[in-house]
């Protein structure tokens, strides 16, 4: 991650991103669940985007995304958390997967403002 010396970091979550992603096709996620993630002090700092039905996160707000953050796939009570390499690292209900997601994102560099 240190190979991106020009990255700038957010200090506040960007809730408007989450409001936008909760509109339209949410791939089985409830709008309330997405907005709750957006209000989270750790998860809400990362830029969310949909990719092939997965809820992905990026430290960068513009394409190309950082592609180093975990992704979540699923709906209802069956969610899976994958690392950036596509390996499953957690499975279970939303609360279980979100808890692990939060731990992993908290260990990463703060999200950057620009690519």
Image (spheres, rainbow, N blue to C red):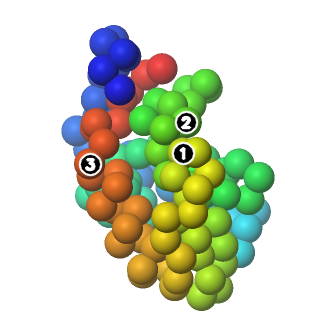
Side of 19 where 13 appears, left or right: left
The quadrant in which residue 72 appears is bottom right
- The residue to which callout 2 is attached is 67
Mark 1 or mark 3: name the one nearer the start of the chain.
1
Residue 58 appears at what percent x and percent y?
Answer: 49, 39
The quadrant in which residue 8 appears is top left
Crowd rating for badge 3 (residues with CA inside 10 Å; few <14, some 14–19, many 20+): few
- The residue to which callout 1 is attached is 84
Q: Is residue 17 visible?
A: no
52 to 22, vertically: above or below: above
Q: Which residue is drawn at 33% across and 12% down?
A: 6
Looking at the rendered image, the quarter that the N terminus falls into is top left
52 to 89, vertically: above or below: above
- The residue to which callout 3 is attached is 107
Mark toward the viewer: 1 or 2: 1
Depth order, front residue of 39/107: 107
């Amino acid at each position: 991650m240190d190979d991106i010396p020009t990255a700038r970091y957010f200090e506040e979550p960007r809730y408007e991103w989450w409001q936008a992603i909760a509109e339209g096709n949410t791939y089985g996620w409830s709008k309330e669940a997405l907005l709750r993630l957006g209000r989270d002090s750790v998860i809400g700092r990362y830029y969310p985007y949909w990719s092939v039905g997965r809820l992905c996160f990026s430290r960068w707000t513009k394409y190309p995304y950082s592609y180093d953050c975990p992704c979540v796939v699923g709906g209802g009570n069956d969610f899976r958390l994958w690392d950036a390499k596509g390996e499953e690292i957690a499975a279970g209900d939303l609360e279980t997967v979100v808890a692990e997601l939060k731990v992993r994102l908290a260990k990463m560099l703060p999200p950057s403002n620009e690519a």
